Image (cartoon, grey):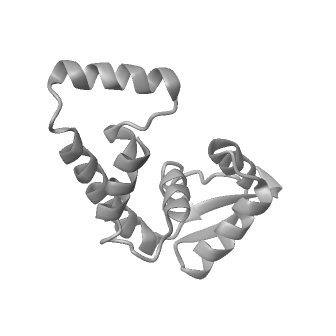
Amino acid sequence: MFSLMKNVQRDASVIKPSLSPPQARLVLIISRYSDSGISVKELARLTSVTPGAITQFINTLVDKKLITRETDPADRRSIKIKLTPSARNEIHQFKNVLFNSAAKKFDALNTDELKEITRIMAKVNPEIITKEEMF
């Protein structure tokens, strides 16, 4: 599985080569919360990374003008992380390449095999992202 994901990420790096795999993962997660934004605490929970490490990643992504920090209107003490408007198009292209690359890898499987692998993956990782959630 690790080798498969490395191949998919390598294909997608053509679009956004300046992102490391962990940075790309964070940006993809943040993009799922594009309207409301996501807190550092929630990002840390979803990635199993410490809030301190998440903050360092965020600083780098802010410097690259891919994300912004915004005060949560519901709680002025809380900060929400959002994609910048200019990053949304880049991320959409990145997701397309990522999804198409993964789809090509799975072309070798028939429908029953795809259903079985999806069932198994959902069993070990209930937070699997579907194509509809990506876009």
The relative height of residue 106 versus residue 118 in the rendered view (above or below) is below
Q: Position of residue 49 (x, y in %)?
A: 70, 51
The relative height of residue 70 versus residue 118 in the rendered view (above or below) is below
Q: Nearer the viewer, residue 60 or 35?
A: 60
Q: Nearer the viewer, residue 75 or 51?
A: 51
Q: Position of residue 105 (x, y in %)?
A: 22, 45
**Among all residues in the image, which is located at the extreme front?**
3
Quarter holding the N terminus? top left
Q: Position of residue 113 (x, y in %)?
A: 22, 22
| Image-quadrant location for residue 121 | top left
Q: Nearer the viewer, residue 111 or 129?
A: 111
Q: In the image, what residue occupies the spot 68% across and 65% down?
A: 70
Is residue 32 rendered to the left or right of residue 92? right
Is residue 16 rendered to the left or right of residue 46? left
Q: In the image, what residue occupies the spot 58% across and 61% down?
A: 82
Is residue 88 rendered to the left or right of residue 65? left
**Among all residues in the image, which is located at the extreme right?**
77
Q: Position of residue 80 (x, y in %)?
A: 68, 58
The relative height of residue 25 versus residue 126 in the rendered view (above or below) is below
Q: In the image, what residue occupies the spot 55% across and 60% down?
A: 22
The relative height of residue 118 versus residue 2 in the rendered view (above or below) is above
Q: In the image, what residue occupies the spot 27% across and 59% down?
A: 97
In the rendered image, is residue 135 in sight? no
In the rendered image, is residue 30 in sight? yes
Q: How many marks?
A: 0
